[in-house]
Image (spheres, coloured by chain):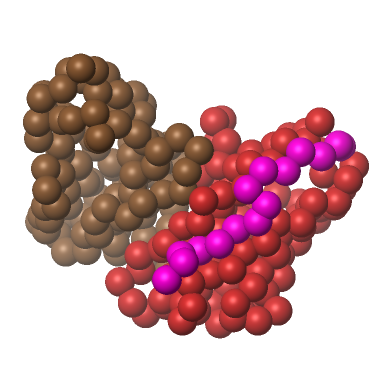
């Protein structure tokens, strides 16, 4: 979707390295959702951010939403092979009900 | 809870045939979403329902696609007639409207139209 840009498209990192994935919206977000998808499977919910400046962490994954609520980042610390997959951000916009517009995804590979 | 259930998991059909994809949402969820995922276009919302009523079908590609939700525990997405460009993975997701907005996804149906 042109409303939501995700970068990078793909990423290869060595095990133990940190990495960041970005998601940028052309409009102010009502909510921002991060999902992970393994090949051939459905999406698994990671985190949801709604307030400007909000930050949430789960194990080694941290997601942030900027103050203007137009940009979010997902940071993985000390990456592991289990982190490999496709990461997608989904945007909820004001007036859009509870539907989500998804970014194009970031394919992450973690090399041993 | 069994999660969102989709059937079939894989479907191979010939161009021109009718295809019906099925979805059972999580019990108690009142919003249901149908998505299509392709390499070229990513994950696109086709249609979503609140309380069994279609709210936004602007993502439905054309008249060949139709979706129904006859009750709170069942939905279908039908393609008639199917075309090779319909080949994709189709996901169903459900959520609790008014809740956190988190959508729970099914495992998807991989459709191949020859």
Indicate the colour of chain B. red
Q: What segment is highlighted magenta in the picture?
A: B1-15
Membership of B8 in magenta stretch = yes
Q: Is residue A66 left or right of residue A22?
A: left
Residue B86, visible in the rendered structure: no
Indicate the colour of chain A. brown
Quadrant for the N terminus of chain B, please: bottom left
User: Residue lying furthest front in this view?
Assistant: B2
| Residue displayed at 33% across by 77% down | B99
Q: Quadrant of residue B56?
A: bottom right
| Residue displayed at 55% across by 42% down | B37
Measured as percent of width and height from the top left, residue B93 is found at 50, 61
Which sits in the foreground, A59 or B33?
A59
Q: Is residue B44 left or right of residue B79?
A: left
Q: Is residue A108 left or right of residue B42?
A: left
Image height of B6 relative to A89, above or below? below
Residue A112, visible in the rendered structure: yes
Image height of A18 relative to B87, above or below? above
Measured as percent of width and height from the top left, residue A29 is found at 29, 58
């Amino acid at each position: 979707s042109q409303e939501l840009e995700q970068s990078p498209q793909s990423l290869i990192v060595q095990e133990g390295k940190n990495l960041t994935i970005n998601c940028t919206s052309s409009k102010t977000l009502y909510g921002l959702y991060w999902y992970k998808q393994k090949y051939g499977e459905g999406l698994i919910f990671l985190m949801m951010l709604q307030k400007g400046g909000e930050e949430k962490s789960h194990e080694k994954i941290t997601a942030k939403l900027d103050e203007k609520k137009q940009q979010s980042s997902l940071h993985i610390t000390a990456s592991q092979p289990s982190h490999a997959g496709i990461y997608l951000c989904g945007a909820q916009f004001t007036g859009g009900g509870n539907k989500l517009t998804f970014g194009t995804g970031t394919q992450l590979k973690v090399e041993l | 809870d069994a999660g969102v259930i989709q059937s079939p998991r894989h479907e191979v059909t010939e161009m021109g045939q009718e295809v019906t994809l099925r979805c059972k949402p999580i019990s108690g969820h009142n919003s249901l979403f149908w998505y299509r995922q392709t390499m070229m276009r990513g994950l696109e919302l086709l249609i979503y329902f609140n309380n069994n009523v279609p709210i936004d079908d602007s993502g439905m590609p054309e008249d060949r696609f139709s979706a129904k939700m006859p009750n709170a525990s069942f939905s279908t997405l039908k393609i008639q007639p199917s075309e090779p460009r319909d080949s994709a993975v189709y996901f169903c997701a459900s959520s609790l409207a008014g809740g956190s907005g988190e959508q729970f996804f099914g495992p998807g149906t991989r459709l191949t139209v020859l």
